[in-house]
Amino acid sequence: MRENVIKAIKDKKIIAIVRGIYGENCLRLSQALLKGGIRLVEFTFDQSDPLGEEKTCESIAAVSGAFQGELFCGAGTVLTVAQVVKAREAGARFLISPNICREVIQATVSMDMVSIPGAFSPTEIEDAYRWGADFVKVFPISGLGTEYIRAVRAPLGHIPLLAVGGVTLENLGEFLEAGASGVGLGGELIRKGLILSGQFDKITELAQTAVQQTERMRT
């Protein structure tokens, strides 16, 4: 299973980042993303919400059950080994963190999930990969830009990087061109106003626009 997810990330390039969307809206959102060509969706733990873990795991379980074989579901903002276990039990196939934690990385891999910790400096990036990460999320990328990806890949080109935090529909192709293996798209794609007003067709259109950017990189 891990190899299938790794291949999907490398091939599809885009992970949709879903925060604070639950229940029926979460299912309709996932359907809209799937129609638009998105195949990987991260459901983020809200660490400030006492019920955040439970609600996120319910979302992962519901979406992975409804779209089994079509969508790969993952958990985001995973900070503890306990959250690794809960995410796996819910059906997560990849885990994303804003930081690097050796115990979280190794627990993720031992449970046959793809590990994507967040790092900022070359030292953190190399540490994360050495500890077993499959990809390293360069985060936040907003203040660094594409040149940082190029600069880091010069000595660390063997480490697959994902650009997250500041990626837009307009610049995601630039990050891929700079050498990122993929990108994470949050509010730029998952627009709560459209979701709350039931305009899921607009979400599908945004997803299609994002996917088109990745397809241009193949030509």
Image (cartoon, helix red, strand yellow):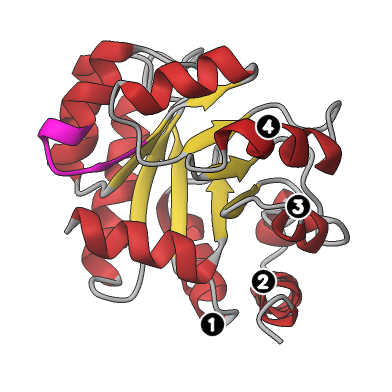
The amino acid pointed to by label 4 is Val
In the picture of the structure, the residue carrying the numbered disc 3 is 178
Q: Which circle's residue, 1 or 3, is located before the other in the chain?
A: 1
Quarter of the N terminus within the rendering: bottom left
The amino acid pointed to by label 3 is Ala
Q: Which is in the foreground here, disc 4 or disc 1?
A: 4
Which residue: 52% across, 25% down? 118
- Name the residue nearer the viewer: 36 or 174: 174
Q: Which circle's residue, 4 or 1, is located before the other in the chain?
A: 1
Task: Estimate the x, y position of residue 149 in percent, counting from the top left.
Answer: 73, 39
Left or right of 95? Residue 82 is: left
Query: Does the residue at mark 4 contact the one at mark 1 (Cβ under 8 Å)?
Result: no
Q: Is residue 98 visible?
A: no
Is residue 110 one of those drawn in magenta? yes
Q: Which is in the foreground here, disc 3 or disc 2?
A: 3
| Label ID, residue 207 | 2
In the picture of the structure, the residue carrying the numbered disc 4 is 152
- Name the residue nearer the viewer: 154 or 138: 154
In space, the residues marked 1 and 2 are separated at their CA atoms by 8 Å
| Label ID, residue 35 | 1
In space, the residues marked 4 and 1 are separated at their CA atoms by 35 Å
SS at mark 1?
Answer: helix
Q: Which circle's residue, 3 or 2, is located before the other in the chain?
A: 3
In space, the residues marked 4 and 3 are separated at their CA atoms by 10 Å
Query: Does the residue at mark 1 contact the one at mark 2 (Cβ under 8 Å)?
Result: yes
Which residue: 56% across, 34% down? 156
The amino acid pointed to by label 1 is Lys
Q: Please state the extent of the stretch shown in magenta in the rendering.
A: 109-115
The answer to which quarter of the image holds residue 117 is top left
